[in-house]
Image (cartoon, grey):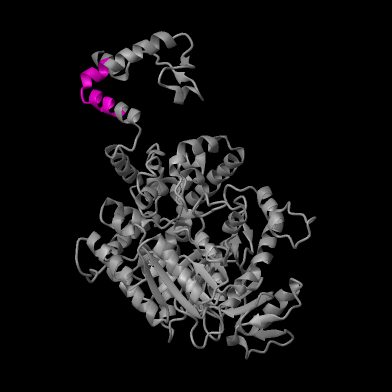
Amino acid sequence: MQVNSLQFKTAAKQAVQDETLQKALNNLNRGFVVKRAKAVAQLPEFDRLRDQAREVKNHTLAYLDTYLMQYEQHVKAAGGTVHWAKDATQACEIIGHICQQHHAKMVTKGKSMITEEIGLNDYLQQQGMQVLETDLGEYILQLRQDHPSHIVAPAIHVLKEQVADSFRAAHQTLDAKRDLHDIDALLAEARATLRYQFGQADVGITGANFLLADSGMAGIVTNEGNGDLTQIMAKTHIVVASLEKVLPDFNAAALIMRLLARSATGQEITAYTTFSTGPRQAQDLDGPEHYHVVLVDNGRTKMLADERRDMLRCIRCGACMNHCPVYGAVGGQTYGWVYPGPMGAVLTPSLAGLEKTHLLPNASTFCGRCVEVCPVRIPLTKLMRHYREAAFSQKLDPARTRWALKLWVWLVKRPKLYHLCMMLAIKILYRFGKKSGRFKYLPLAHGWTQDRDFPAPESTTFQRQWQQYERQ
Amino acid sequence: MKDSRATVLQDIQHALGRKTPRQPSQFAMQPINLSRVHDVDLVKVFIEQAQQARNQVIETTENQLISTIAQWLEDHDLKVSINIAPALADWDWRTLTVQSGPADEGSIVSVTPALCGIAETGTVLCTSGPDHPTTLNFLSEVHMILLDKSQLVATYEQAWYCVEAQPVLPRTVNFISGPSRTGDIEQTLQFGAHGPKQCVILLYGATHR
């Protein structure tokens, strides 16, 4: 998927005006946030589990090569093939090649962010294959030629009327006069439409929430069951997973299972958590005949080398974006790529390069809610600051911003001079603002005053007031 | 593609500041006792959690399993052929029409045994195999799961021991916590997205205590 993160400011302005989007984002705050809090309250051990999860992930990353090789060995032993892709292009080529080998005409997909990241659907379609997203949210987006706006609830920005419109346009064989007013009718239609597609698929592609090194199993966490039907009904099952999904064993996965759903949607656990490896076994009555795993680097090894390694702990729960005031105001598509919100503000520069994405680490007030809720304790704001510093030293911010910052730093390093300037500014604002208590217009403050008034100071600077107070 | 494997592994090692793989240090994870399954009546906790996960739980006896199923089908006006796991093929299904084997897109009701039940979230664990093919867990509209109380464990980790104790590690291991669902349309919870719309757990037998 193309990186459009430099459009953030324009996109944000539009997003804030978009009534449909705002309505959808309001639902988000009442839903996931409240439900997560409730689920956390019902599990007294939650915080200790977070600490353990951080330790397990750190341990695994420190031995990433060993665990990946162990995982590979077990997949081979189970009759599967493991492929390694350095970048997105290679990953697509490998997957395309496997599909061609198996003469694939139709490919079903479970929900997978890594496949969005590498642009897999477009690639396979260009190779002449039909690609069908089976996760309901992704299916809706596919019909609308739209992109996910949230990593867990991808179609969160789409209203039910819009879903109905898309279904009418796409499902031409059905009675045009049918009533799609009810969401139950929409779900029933999606279920019926996709039901027979699973079995028709030549290839089924899923992502992986975990890769277990000691058994070669890949785990997926879903609610719909589409990921399961994708993998057991198609003739060939391909798992696409980035390197950092590997874990030592099931115990590590169990730990993360306890954190993932609770952090994401507030469920104790999703309806389905499935582990599988290899093709169907000799005596099995169902399951795929061929099994491939494509391990994708695409920038992770670079992150492993420095403080960005912390970001590799991410389990893709989406809690950070659910709690982020910026995401909550503008939604996921504003971020311009696959990963939105706080985790996107760190991961996107890491994977796509800072030049195209340097606005994203600035899309934050550093309120720290993301850090508070991250189940694996990623220091998101610290990592965003890392990128802000890098952007500054690489001169990616506009000259005006850099000069303003440099002036500020110069002043702040001279406290007496700084205070003098502040005193002057406050005195002037006080003099002119005394009458109404607010400013509708202020030089240099257009960004503020175009939407709201600027409050006038009521007396003098805090420091001066404090000095006066101390003298009393 | 051999090149990319070597490249990726080398890049990992370079990032970790070494030139060769290293055996992982012994990673001791102190097991955290979950209070909700510590020193409790596992059956009670399992039932509570399973109901919270939107399963219907029916307690019955081994002898009454088939009649309970028959009664449930009658109560729900389902006069259909039911898809049963081959493991249950030898049972006396009396008046019920059964088909043993994998499910297909037309399946309405499936009946499978579970390997074990997990009290911490009311989850049932089902594995693939010739006696209980995985499609029975996903293609029907109603999934009826037979669970022996003596097969109840407290945690996911304990359930995995049951999996590892099998003579051969199965291809697929399903942790199932209620019927299929989605909140993808306007964040409203709906059941029966692609998997079953209803899950009925028939809990029978006596616990090993």
Q: Residue at x 72, y 75 (%)?
A: B73
Q: Quadrant of the C terminus of chain A?
A: top left
Residue A254 visible to the viewer: no
Q: Position of residue B149 (x, y in %)?
A: 53, 77
Dominant secondary structure of the residues highlighted in magenta in the image: helix
Q: Is residue A434 above or below residue B116?
A: above
Residue B55 forms part of the magenta stretch: no
Residue A411 visible to the viewer: yes
Q: Position of residue A120 (x, y in %)?
A: 48, 61
**Residue lying furthest bottom in this view?**
B90
Q: For this rendering, which residue is in front, B70 or B186?
A: B186
Q: Residue at x 69, y 52 (%)?
A: A164
Residue A415 forms part of the magenta stretch: yes
User: Residue A230, located in which quarter of the rendered image?
Assistant: bottom right
Q: Residue at x 26, y 38 (%)?
A: A393
**Residue lying furthest front in this view?**
A127
Q: Is residue A297 above or below residue A407?
A: below
Q: Position of residue A210 (x, y in %)?
A: 41, 66
**Magenta residues, as a range?**
A405-420
